Amino acid sequence: MTLQRIRSNERMSAAVTFANLVFLAGQVPDNRSENADGQTRQVLAKIDNLLAEAGSDRSRILSAQIWLKDIEADFAAMNAVWSEWLPAECAPARATVEARLASADVLVEIMVIAASA
């Protein structure tokens, strides 16, 4: 079994593949001036790109962890974008919690584990 690290630096890898699994690091938006809807769309696009680079796609997500800066204010907006993005009948195991994120202007961070294609 080959272990592959994708987009690595001295601190972390954006993704790691091993044994037909793809582990993504938490993804945050690049344009942090957007609201939760816009930040969620950015994060999901980054997830799509990383999954494709690792040989997978959103239909193969097994687990998702979602962190929101303010769950009361942003849960509905994030969830609407998530539901629109997720293919039918492909809902992963998922947890969503409120957390103090690494930067005050980050409203959403998402980390997933997927099966490779």
Image (tube, rainbow, N blue to C red):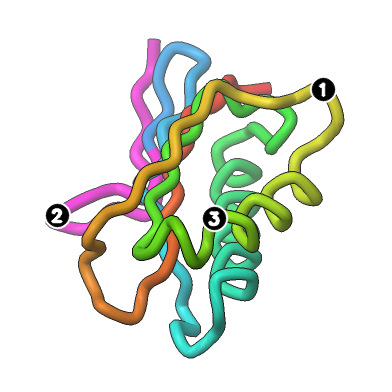
Relative to 8, 64 lies left or right: right
How many angstroms separate mark 1 from mark 2 (CA)?
A: 36 Å
The foreground one among 13 and 41 is 41
Disc 3: which residue: 75
Question: Dots 1 and 2: beta carbons under 8 Å?
Answer: no
Is residue 6 on the magenta stretch? yes
Q: Residue furthest front?
A: 72
- The image quadrant that residue 59 belongs to is top right
Q: Which residues are magenta?
A: 1-15
Relative to 65, 46 lies left or right: right
Residue, x 44% and y 41% (percent of image)?
96
How would you rate the neighbour count of disc 1 (Cα within 10 Å): few for under 14, some for 14-19, many for 20 or more? few
Question: Dots 3 and 2: beta carbons under 8 Å?
Answer: no
Classify the position of the C terminus by image quarter: top right
Task: Name which of mark 3 and mark 1 comes first in the sequence.
Answer: 3
Residue, x 46% and y 78% (percent of image)?
30
**SS at circle 3:** helix
Disc 2: which residue: 11
- Residue 114 picture location, percent across and down: 55, 26
Mark number displayed over residue 89: 1
Classify the position of the N terminus by image quarter: top left
Q: Amino acid type of disc 2?
A: Arg
How many angstroms separate mark 3 from mark 1 (CA)?
A: 21 Å
